[in-house]
Amino acid sequence: MAAFQFQFQRLLELKENEKGQAQVEMAEAVKKQEEMEKNVLKAQQKLSVLHNELAAVQLKGISIFELRRLEGHIETLKEKLVTEQRKLHNSSLQVDQKQAELVTKVKETKTWITIRDQQKQTFIEEQSKKEQIEMDELTSVRMFYQATGSKG
């Protein structure tokens, strides 16, 4: 029996490699998004601490110079928070894009695997039919010889 060879095997391998690359890129994008989430959280925590510190020192009494310094620091942290939130948003968009690419690559790979499996099944069925025809011919020849041998 001949061995099955998928005529598009190289294309299937290429699609599987592309899927693997898309999985790696997706993982990297998720890792970056997680890092951005941590940065936003840190900025929010620092801002919260400064607000609490400002409230505490205002109750005790504080010089205008010190008040302006703290408020300036708070404004700087607010700007940093906005920047980090923007980076997080961009990172989320990147994750969505990589996820869509991965879904596409997975679908393409599954399509080619399905085509390969269907062709393999067709090949097996054709081989089985050929073998059955050969077996039928051998049986017919044997029966012919048995029939002619017993008459002669």
Image: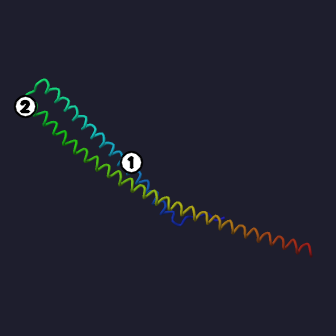
Q: Specify the amino acid type for callout 1.
A: Ala
The way the protein has been coloured in the rendering is: rainbow
- Considering the image in quadrants, where does the N terminus appear? bottom right
Q: Which mark is residue 27?
A: 1
Mark pair 1, 2: CA separation:
48 Å
Q: Which residue shows up at 50% across the image and 58% down it? A: 110
Quick one: 1 or 38, which is closer to the camera?
38
Position in image of residue 91 (x %, y %): 30, 49
Task: Name the element at disc 2.
Answer: helix
Q: Specify the amino acid type for callout 2.
A: Phe
Position in image of residue 138 (x %, y %): 78, 70
Instruction: Give the crowd class for mark 2: few <14, some 14-19, many >=20 residues within 10 Å.
Output: few
Q: Compared with residue 152, is residue 77 higher up or lower down, i.e. above or below?
A: above
Position in image of residue 65 (x %, y %): 7, 31
Task: Name the element at disc 1.
Answer: helix
Position in image of residue 120 (x %, y %): 59, 63
Quick one: 54 or 29, which is closer to the camera?
54
Q: Is residue 112 left or right of residue 25?
A: right
**Quadrant of the rendered structure where residue 63 is?**
top left
Disc 1 to disc 2: CB gap under 8 Å: no
Q: Compared with residue 42, is residue 139 higher up or lower down, i.e. above or below?
A: below
The residue indicated by pointer 2 is: 65
